Amino acid sequence: MIVLHHLGISQSERITWLLEELQLEYKLVKHTRAPALAPDSLKNIPGNNAGKSPFIEDPDAGITLSESGAITDYIIWKYGNGRLALKPDNKNFSEYLHWKDFSNATLQPAMLTLMFLKAAQISEENQMLGFANQRLHEALKLMDDRLKDSKWLAGDEFTAADTMSVYPVTTQRYWGPQVSLKEYPNLLRWLKDCSERPAYQKAMEKGDPDMKLLIGAEAPGESLLAAGGSESSIWKK
């Protein structure tokens, strides 16, 4: 049985959701931020000195694994019989590959860059801040344009491209940047569809039962980095 080490208010929600969609048995071990960074309880797990989350243990196979994209592929192909992935003979195979990796390769780095610049209180006139903001909105527009004519990111079929991509435009906005999604109606429609999936609701209730889900256009006015991390109440229901 997979053991999933889940850090609250973090991207490890992707794996909880994936496991629920695949209806696989797993053991969920929850960890609390201290108050923003990884706690010692994560760093003390053998093989996880950096305190990564999500982090899984597969005792039957004798392996441990971090990185949400790698974990997603591992679970889908080892235990999910390929469900939630598209195969090479599928007409949308290339779209699946692109959008499954888009979140970690393009969208999330853009969000983190802007988050750190704003946390450092860089002047609004600073050229680098302008570049970072433009990069983020270009990534969001790519998603919105894709979802204008496609129900899910890979096409008509819900896939791991979707489970990988919700976190940056929802929970990540608690940490920053506090970007509005009001300019992206197709993305908001997709978020609504994702949030109404029973597996998503079950996963979020298991992993972060106290968290108010950020599935609407607006984010809080203050980031958790500025408000004290998990000790703040701005992320709670």
Image: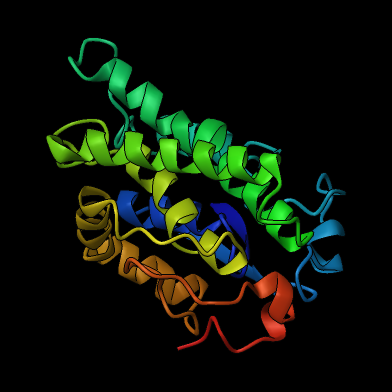
Q: Position of residue 11 (x, y in %)?
A: 56, 55
Judging from the image, the colouring scheme is rainbow
Q: Residue at x 78, y 63 (%)?
A: 38
Farthest residue in the top direction? 89
How many marks overall? 0
Q: Position of residue 60 (x, y in %)?
A: 61, 42
Query: Along the line of sight, which residue is nearer the eye, 16 or 165?
Result: 165
Up-down: is 64 above or below 203?
A: above
Q: Residue at x 82, y 56 (%)?
A: 45
Query: Along the line of sight, which residue is nearer the eye, 184 or 16?
Result: 184
Q: Is residue 123 left or right of residue 148?
A: right
Occupied quadrant, residue 98:
top left
Q: Residue at x 60, y 37 (%)?
A: 131
Up-down: is 208 above or below 200?
A: below
Query: Along the line of sight, which residue is nearer the eye, 55 or 14?
Result: 14
Query: Along the line of sight, which residue is nearer the eye, 9 or 1?
Result: 9
Q: Residue at x 15, y 36 (%)?
A: 150
Q: Position of residue 148 (x, y in %)?
A: 16, 39
Q: Quadrant of the C terminus?
A: bottom left
Res 74 seen here: no
Occupied quadrant, residue 99:
top left
Q: Position of residue 203 (x, y in %)?
A: 40, 66
